Amino acid sequence: MIDLFEPIIDGILTNGYGSTDEFLTPDETKVLASRLHQRRGAGQFREAGTGNQQVLVENAMRGDEIMWLDETTATPEEAVFLHRIGEFVAYMNQTCYLGLRDYEFHYAIYPPGTVYKRHLDRFHSDSRRKLSVICYLNTDWNDLDGGQLALYLPTASGDTERQVFISPKGGRLVCFESGLLEHEVLIATHERLSITGWLKTA
């Protein structure tokens, strides 16, 4: 697992965000995408909101549907994912001394034509979210399909910023500091699937 985690940490320290294209194998990606669709078909998803009260907003701001993952009701495949996240948390604490204590994750599906406009993941009234984590479940994704994650990175001067666009290809994980990087989800021509969550301090 060290070979998997180190590139993510190096990227965060060097560029402000880290990623790996191999957090999930192709088979794991397909199975989790199937579980997502099964759970959505069973009526377990709901429209996402904003803020720590999850206030529903107009589709112009955010158009995804979500379902929170729970270790007590997780399928074997979901449990494998959460266990790997737990290993990542332990390694981050061991190497970077972040004091991470908990995590929370949900499935997310963006129907075609929906977005999530530019925002920060950390709440004004709750600073426990330390790192944002997105793991994509899209199989056979093409860059022309859209749906990129747009990250707004500050520059050394502090008076400008640069944008980075990350395609939501299956198996890819992206991680960045929740309170520092504003980001948005761009429009896609296909359903865009992910498991999204946060690594939290006490």
Image: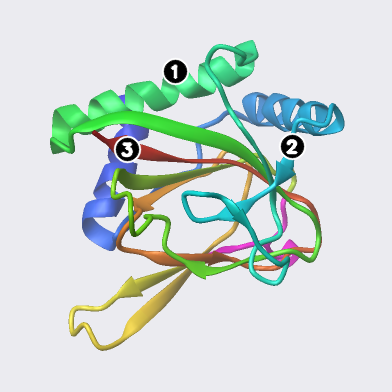
- C-beta proximity under 8 Å, tags 2 and 1: no
Q: CA distance from mark 1 to mark 3?
A: 16 Å
Precedes in sequence: disc 2 or disc 1: 2
Q: Which residue is mark 1?
A: 83
Local secondary structure at mark 3? strand
Q: Amino acid at mark 2?
A: Phe
The picture places residue 143, in percent across and down from the top left corner, at 68, 62
Depth check: give the residue in front, 90 or 126.
126
Q: Name the mark nearer the viewer: 2 or 1.
A: 2
Q: Work out which quarter of the rendered image holds the C terminus and state it.
A: top left
Depth check: give the residue in front, 52 or 173.
52
Q: CA distance from mark 2 to mark 3?
A: 23 Å
Residue, x 25% and y 48% (percent of image)? 10
- C-beta proximity under 8 Å, tags 2 and 3: no
The picture places residue 14, in percent across and down from the top left corner, at 23, 58
Residue, x 73% and y 31% (percent of image)? 36
Depth check: give the residue in front, 99 or 29.
99
Q: Work out which quarter of the rendered image holds the N terminus and state it.
A: top left
Local secondary structure at mark 2? loop
